[in-house]
């Protein structure tokens, strides 16, 4: 499990120190505050370790990382990721249990990362990034844009997810908590999403009816992606899942059920990093923390500064929460007027 993250001069993230990470970790802030950027920075480092340490690569870890950063952030050169006007090089350090992975480079770096140090043990589990937009209806386009055209457009979070969804759902015994989570996910869907080999496309199956994935609601497709990754065994108990804006395209009841499923999976070993600007998501995770006496670290962007808190200890200070409280007070005042 990741326990600590430190970044300096990483794009919009001038200085971030996030300690005492747990199985569920939350990033909150307004639009363009750097939430997604932070998740992608962590994800890029993890995927580098997973690709390098499985023995199928002739490239060094530094070469894999440079490629990962290039395709994830899609900058002309990775040196462009260094904070403009910042002092010093970009640096990244993460701790997994007690072992560290770190690297740094300057603004003139093209693709050769000179300083990289790794002491983290080999990882057989997969990390995955679930972006706000679903990918099922775009899977073939994403794969073609990278594997045939090799052009910018869909970054590596989309490409990695599209590849992971290639694996067919496996029949037979699965982890008990995964099987239960899949049942819960499918209850939200009121059906199943399946890949039809005959027509080579995803379809939504409800009873005896089948619907083309293109006419299926985006929220259903998003839930189906997590269901598929549990079913095809891409995810395991030691996986890390990054979810950007879980509230996107989902109604409140579905968001609540999804976060309950996330809490169930987290209790069985999967580590989650969630970015959100939804008061509903924050409040639901706060209730989970209180009900289960669960530590849920939260890092919050306030005026370009990142502040740490824990939902187990209460709701953190943040403009998103402040605005929700202000609207509530305004409603009460109108009722009492």
Image: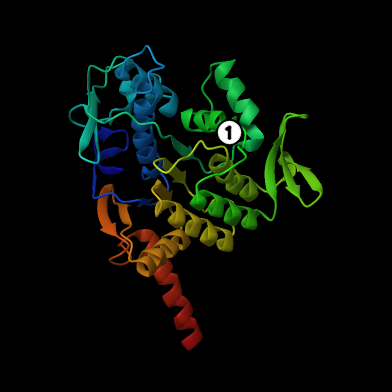
Q: Position of residue 115 (x, y in %)?
A: 21, 20
Q: How is the image coloured?
A: rainbow
**46 relative to 238, above or below:** above
In the rendered structure, the answer to whether residue 47 lies left or right of residue 173 reads left
**Can residue 199 be seen at all in this image of the molecule?**
yes
> In the picture, residue 170 is in which quadrant?
top right
> In the picture, residue 62 is in which quadrant?
top left
Give the quarter of the figure containing the N terminus: top left
- Mark 1 surroundings within 10 Å by alpha-carbon count, few (fewer than 14), some (14 through 19), many (20 or more): some
| Residue drawn at point x = 74 percent, y = 44 percent | 215
Q: Residue placed farthest to the top in the image? A: 58
**134 relative to 153, above or below:** below
In-front residue for pair 312/55:
55
Q: Position of residue 194 (x, y in %)?
A: 69, 40
| Residue drawn at point x = 62 percent, y = 57 percent | 188
Q: Which residue is mark 1?
A: 165
| Residue drawn at point x = 33 percent, y = 57 percent | 296
Q: Circle 1 sits in a helix, a strand or a loop, which is it?
A: loop
Q: Residue placed farthest to the front in the image? A: 173
In the rendered structure, the answer to whether residue 3 lies left or right of residue 264 reads left
**Can residue 91 be seen at all in this image of the molecule?**
no
Q: Position of residue 291 (x, y in %)?
A: 39, 69
| Residue drawn at point x = 47 percent, y = 32 percent | 157
Q: Position of residue 250 (x, y in %)?
A: 58, 55
């Amino acid at each position: 499990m990741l326990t600590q993250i430190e970044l300096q001069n990483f794009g919009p993230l001038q200085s971030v120190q996030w300690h005492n990470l747990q199985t569920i970790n939350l990033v909150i802030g307004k639009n363009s505050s750097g939430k997604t950027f932070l998740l992608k920075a962590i994800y890029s480092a993890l995927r580098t370790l997973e690709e390098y340490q499985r023995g199928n690569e002739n490239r060094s870890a530094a070469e894999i990382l440079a490629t990962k950063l290039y395709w994830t952030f899609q900058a002309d050169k990775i040196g462009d990721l260094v904070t403009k006007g910042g002092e010093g090089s970009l640096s990244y350090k993460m701790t997994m249990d007690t072992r560290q992975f770190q690297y740094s480079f300057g603004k003139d770096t093209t693709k050769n990362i000179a300083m990289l140090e790794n002491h983290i043990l080999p990882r057989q589990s997969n990390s995955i990034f679930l972006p706000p937009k679903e990918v099922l209806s775009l899977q073939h386009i994403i794969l073609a844009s990278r594997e045939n055209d090799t052009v910018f457009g869909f970054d590596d979070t989309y490409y990695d997810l599209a590849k992971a969804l290639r694996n067919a759902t496996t029949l037979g015994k699965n982890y008990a908590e995964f099987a239960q989570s899949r049942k819960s996910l499918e209850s939200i869907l009121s059906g199943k999403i399946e890949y039809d080999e005959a027509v080579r496309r995803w379809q939504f199956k409800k009873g005896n009816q089948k619907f083309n994935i293109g006419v299926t609601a985006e929220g259903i497709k998003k839930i189906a992606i997590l269901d598929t990754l549990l079913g095809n065994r891409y995810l395991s108990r030691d996986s890390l899942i990054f979810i950007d804006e879980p509230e996107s395209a989902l109604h409140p009841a579905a968001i609540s059920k999804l976060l309950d499923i996330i809490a169930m999976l987290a209790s069985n070993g999967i580590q989650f990093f969630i970015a959100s600007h939804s008061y509903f998501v924050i409040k639901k995770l706060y209730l989970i923390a209180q009900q289960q006496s669960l530590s849920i670290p939260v890092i919050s962007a306030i005026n370009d500064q990142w502040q740490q808190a824990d939902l187990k200890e209460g709701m953190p200070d943040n403009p998103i929460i402040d605005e929700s409280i202000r609207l509530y007070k305004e409603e009460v005042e109108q009722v009492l007027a």
